[in-house]
Amino acid sequence: MKKLLTLALLIFCLLTSIFTPSAIALDTVNGSQIFSVQCAGCHLNGGNIVRRGKTLKQKALKRYGMDSLEAITDIVTNGKSNMSAYKDRLNAQQIQDVAAYVLEQAEKDWR
């Protein structure tokens, strides 16, 4: 009986973790809104008005090793070269959302 209860509890925990939305789920709609306010001034339609070749297009992201959620999150958080850091303006969830939005748009070629 004890083994059966333990097994049932384990199955319940697994199913709950699989089917319950994560508290840190990425929200690309929110990311889009943040991008419009914080990023579009320099990166309109995935471009880059400061450094022409360093766009947010998929080819450029891959070329510069910025084609992952982690890489984009890091550069948005800490900045690099001409890219400002946003860790004092956006919280971690907002940064994750905008990074997810950038990846999503790059896959769609910013259309």
Image (spheres, rainbow, N blue to C red):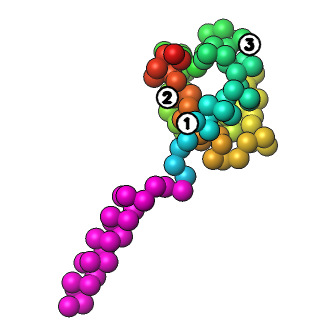
Disc 2: CA contacts within 10 A as few (<14), some (14-19) or many (>=20): some
Q: Are marks 2 and 1 in contact (CB under 8 Å)?
A: yes
Report the number of numbered marks.
3
Which residue is the site of mark 2?
A: 104
Under tag 3, what secondary structure? loop
Which residue does the image show at 69% across and 39% down from the upper left? 77
Whole-Å distance between the Cαs marked 2 and 3? Answer: 22 Å
Q: Which residues are magenta?
A: 1-23
Which residue does the image show at 51% across and 21% down from the upper left? 106
Instruction: Report x, y in % for residue 42.
Output: 72, 18
Q: Tell me if I can see residue 102 in this picture.
A: yes
Which residue is the site of mark 1?
A: 28
Q: Are marks 2 and 3 in contact (CB under 8 Å)?
A: no
Under tag 1, what secondary structure? helix
Whole-Å distance between the Cαs marked 1 and 3? Answer: 25 Å
- For the residue marked with disc 3, what is the amino acid? Val
Q: Quadrant of residue 12?
A: bottom left
Instruction: Work out whether mark 2 precedes mark 3 in sequence or the reverse, and give the earlier one.
Output: 3
Instruction: Work out whether mark 2 precedes mark 1 in sequence or the reverse, and give the earlier one.
Output: 1
- For the residue marked with disc 2, what is the amino acid? Glu
Q: Quadrant of residue 9?
A: bottom left
Q: Main secondary structure of the magenta part?
A: helix
Whole-Å distance between the Cαs marked 2 and 1? Answer: 8 Å
Q: Tell me if I can see residue 63 in this picture.
A: no
- 94 falls in the magenta region: no
- For the residue marked with disc 1, what is the amino acid? Thr
Under tag 2, what secondary structure? helix
Which residue is the site of mark 3?
A: 50
